[in-house]
Image: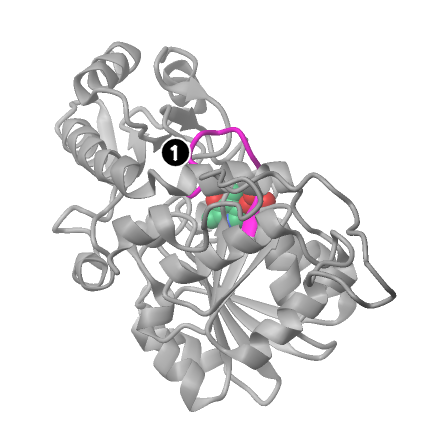
């Protein structure tokens, strides 16, 4: 089955009691047993919920995995994956991560004795320099947020397999429409379904997808033991969002390309970060591992003062100034003061995340209106 069909049909079937075509929202905390231990496979809703089950199966199918494990947010999903580790273990992570991921690694898990190395992976071979006897996991995001760097997933998987490490890929930016890391050798895929998968800026949700049964067993155990589970209403919203992922992503890609080209030719714009440009440093890898380049774009102005960026950020009308990304409506953001404020300034600037950097999540409105909006704001 191809992706568009899976997005609509995987994991779901008409409700047996009514024929309802849409998976019901099973808003219940418990399930009645006819005798002790005699039940329909559902005992308590932290452990199992039919709405969540349908979504977990759908997500597993669209990432070409076998098991989906849902969480209350993308960060709760990350938290679940990190709990596979023990004190003393080490993680090699890319140095250009979502700010909240950096925060949970350094401010939470480091306190529990897990060590993190944040390293450049523009050349994946660099991570070999950090592998030692304690290394257990490689954690990457590609394309990265907000600089749209591309990391070679297959190359990371090869290094992971040579050293028996787990390779976890945060696939939020690409979405399963553009990239399937498990097919490239990754062991774990993480999503903030808050973004493209949900797609309508109306839910916070996270998911982990794996192929390996033993890994899945551990993750279900963590999901149930730690309890960061999503509610059934949120699972329903994500299931509904999924059904149009392919159609939305097609338009995000088209609009992304139009806006990226426009910015590139604007006299006041300095750098434009978008992995679809042929001169993007890892464009060849992007072409190999992705089916399109998406709608995330970052850029800087030639006037590199913070005030110049602030002027643009507060002058758009269709692009709303807000955190988050991946919804149908276009958003504009300022990583240094918003999504990435949790990263110390020196570290940020060193990695190219300067104060004048502006990030766009290009939505699925008409591209000409979006370009006109930016044109008025940039001047
Ligand atoms: C938003 C985001 C997260 C965190 O997800 P939440 O649902 O907000 O907890 C993780 N990774 C990336 C790349 C994100 O954009």
In front of the other: 304 or 220: 220
Q: Is residue 48 above or below residue 336?
A: below
In magenta stretch: residue 198: yes
Relative placement, left or right, of 358 versus 373 is: right
Name the quarter where the N terminus is drawn.
bottom left
Q: Toward which corner of the image does residue 341 lie, by quadrant?
A: top right
Relative placement, left or right, of 158 versus 166 is: left
Q: Is residue 234 above or below residue 188?
A: above
Where's residue 254, x and y in %?
18, 35
Name the quarter where the C terminus is drawn.
top left
Where's residue 292, x and y in %?
21, 49
Q: Which residues are magenta?
A: 197-206
Where's residue 35, x and y in %?
86, 63
Q: Is residue 235 among what the camera can see? A: yes
Where's residue 275, x and y in %?
23, 48
Q: Is residue 309 above or below residue 293?
A: above
Q: Toward which corner of the image does residue 155 lie, by quadrant?
A: bottom left
In front of the other: 333 or 68: 68
Q: Is residue 14 above or below residue 227?
A: above
Residue at 57% from the left image edge and 39% from the top image edge: 24
Residue at 28% from the left image edge and 43% from the top image edge: 246
Q: Main secondary structure of the magenta part?
A: loop
In magenta stretch: residue 79: no
Instruction: Identify the residue under disc 1.
Output: 357
Residue placed farthest to the right in the image?
A: 36
């Amino acid at each position: 089955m191809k992706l568009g069909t899976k997005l609509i049909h995987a994991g779901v079937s008409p409700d047996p009691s009514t024929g309802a075509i849409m998976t019901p929202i099973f808003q219940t905390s418990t399930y009645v047993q006819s005798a002790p231990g005699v039940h329909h496979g559902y005992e308590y809703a932290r452990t199992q919920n039919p709405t969540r089950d349908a979504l977990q199966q759908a997500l597993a199918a669209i990432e070409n995995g076998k098991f989906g494990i849902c969480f209350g947010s993308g960060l709760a999903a990350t938290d679940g994956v990190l709990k596979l580790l023990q004190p003393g273990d080490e993680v090699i992570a890319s140095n250009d991560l979502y700010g909240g991921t950096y925060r949970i690694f350094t401010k939470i898990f480091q306190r529990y004795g897990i060590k993190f190395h944040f390293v450049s992976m523009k050349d994946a071979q660099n991570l070999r320099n950090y592998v030692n006897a304690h290394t257990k996991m490689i954690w990457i995001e590609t394309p990265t947020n907000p600089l749209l760097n591309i990391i070679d997933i297959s190359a990371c998987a090869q290094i992971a397999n040579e050293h028996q490490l787990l390779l976890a890929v945060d696939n939020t930016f690409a979405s399963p429409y553009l990239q399937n890391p498990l097919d490239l050798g990754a062991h774990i895929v993480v999503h903030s379904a808050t973004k493209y998968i949900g797609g309508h800026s109306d839910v916070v949700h996270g998911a982990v997808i794996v192929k390996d049964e033993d890994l899945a067993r551990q993750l279900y155990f963590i999901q149930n033991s730690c309890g960061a589970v999503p509610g059934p209403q949120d699972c329903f919203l994500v299931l509904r969002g999924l059904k149009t992922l392919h159609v939305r992503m097609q338009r995000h890609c088209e609009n992304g390309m139009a806006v990226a080209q426009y910015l590139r030719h604007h006299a006041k714009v300095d750098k434009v970060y978008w992995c679809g440009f042929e001169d993007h440093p890892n464009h060849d890898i992007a072409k190999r591992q992705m089916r399109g380049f998406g709608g995330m774009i970052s850029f800087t102005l030639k006037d590199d003062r913070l005030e110049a960026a602030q002027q643009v950020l507060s002058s758009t009308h269709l692009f709303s100034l807000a955190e988050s990304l991946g919804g149908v409506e276009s958003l504009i953001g300022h990583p240094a003061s918003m999504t990435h404020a949790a990263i110390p300034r020196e570290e940020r600037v060193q990695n190219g995340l300067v104060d004048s950097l502006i990030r766009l999540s290009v939505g699925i409105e008409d591209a000409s209106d979006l370009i006109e909006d930016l044109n008025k704001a940039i001047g």
